[in-house]
């Protein structure tokens, strides 16, 4: 499945989807996601029982931004991989340059070192495709406005995610 993106042609999305399918085969991961920097899901392939995938994507993008800020404070040029280990499913997120995040959902059957190796190598191929698909250089102001819109959309999505987590039951417990 993919969601149409203004910035990425359908042809490029199909090529990237094929790469992600290959990653799943080689790594043993169950599901692959390509997420833009604002947290918008661009491609989802494979199988996962996660119901709130849109919220997950926003949180992954926020986690990436947080990790980059932590890296800057620690004097790291960049942190390009984020790993979340759960009791059943785990997440491995790899930067695809500054444009996207490749996230693999996997369980204990997948070998982590193999998954990391495949994801890292294939993220470069995805980045190359995204680079080829970029608009011709030109209107920097238009791109800057687009980035501002991305930031606003991410902020709104995060507000929605955190509002959904608060309930009236929380107020009753504190009373």
Image: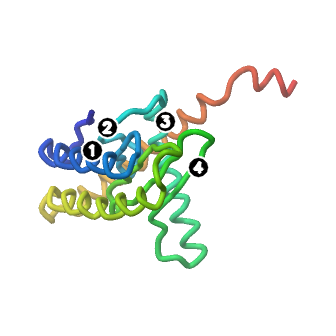
Please tell me which of labels 2 and 4 falls first in the chain: 2
Left or right, residue 154 beside residue 14: right
Q: Nearer the viewer, residue 21 or 102?
A: 21
Please tell me which of labels 3 and 1 falls first in the chain: 1
- Name the quarter where the C terminus is drawn: top right
C-alpha separation, residue under disc 1 versus residue under disc 2: 7 Å
C-alpha separation, residue under disc 2 versus residue under disc 3: 17 Å
Q: Nearer the viewer, mark 3 or mark 1?
A: 1
How packed is label 1: few (under 14 Cα within 10 Å), some, or many (20 or more)? some
Residue position marked by numbered label 1 in the rendering: 21
Farthest residue in the bottom direction? 75
C-alpha separation, residue under disc 2 versus residue under disc 4: 21 Å
Residue position marked by numbered label 4 in the rendering: 85
C-alpha separation, residue under disc 4 versus residue under disc 3: 18 Å
Q: Disc number at residue 55?
A: 3
Asked which secondary structure carries label 1, the reply is: helix
Which x, y percent locates residue 63?
Answer: 53, 53
C-alpha separation, residue under disc 3 versus residue under disc 1: 23 Å
Q: Disc number at residue 45?
A: 2
On the question of residue 7 being in view, the answer is no
Q: Nearer the viewer, residue 82 or 130?
A: 82
Asked which secondary structure carries label 2, the reply is: strand
Please tell me which of labels 1 and 2 falls first in the chain: 1
C-alpha separation, residue under disc 1 versus residue under disc 4: 22 Å
Please tell me which of labels 1 and 4 falls first in the chain: 1
Q: Nearer the viewer, residue 84 or 171?
A: 84
How packed is label 2: few (under 14 Cα within 10 Å), some, or many (20 or more)? some
Left or right, residue 6 beside residue 123: left
Please tell me which of labels 4 and 3 falls first in the chain: 3
């Amino acid at each position: 499945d993919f969601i149409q993106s203004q910035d990425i042609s359908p042809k490029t999305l199909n090529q990237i989807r094929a790469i992600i399918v290959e990653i799943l085969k080689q790594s043993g991961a169950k599901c692959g996601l390509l997420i833009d920097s604002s947290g918008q899901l661009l491609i989802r392939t494979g199988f996962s029982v996660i119901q709130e995938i849109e919220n997950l994507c926003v949180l992954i993008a926020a986690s990436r931004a947080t990790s980059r800020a932590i890296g800057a404070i620690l004097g790291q040029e960049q942190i390009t991989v984020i790993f979340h280990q759960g009791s059943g499913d785990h997440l491995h997120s790899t930067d695809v340059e500054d444009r996207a995040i490749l996230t693999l959902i996997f369980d204990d059957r997948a070998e982590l070192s193999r998954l990391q190796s495949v994801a890292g190598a294939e993220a470069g191929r995805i980045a190359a495709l995204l680079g080829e698909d970029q608009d011709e250089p030109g209107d920097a102001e238009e791109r800057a406005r687009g980035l501002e819109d991305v930031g606003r959309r991410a902020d709104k999505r995060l507000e929605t995610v955190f509002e959904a987590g608060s309930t009236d039951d929380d107020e009753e417990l504190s009373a």
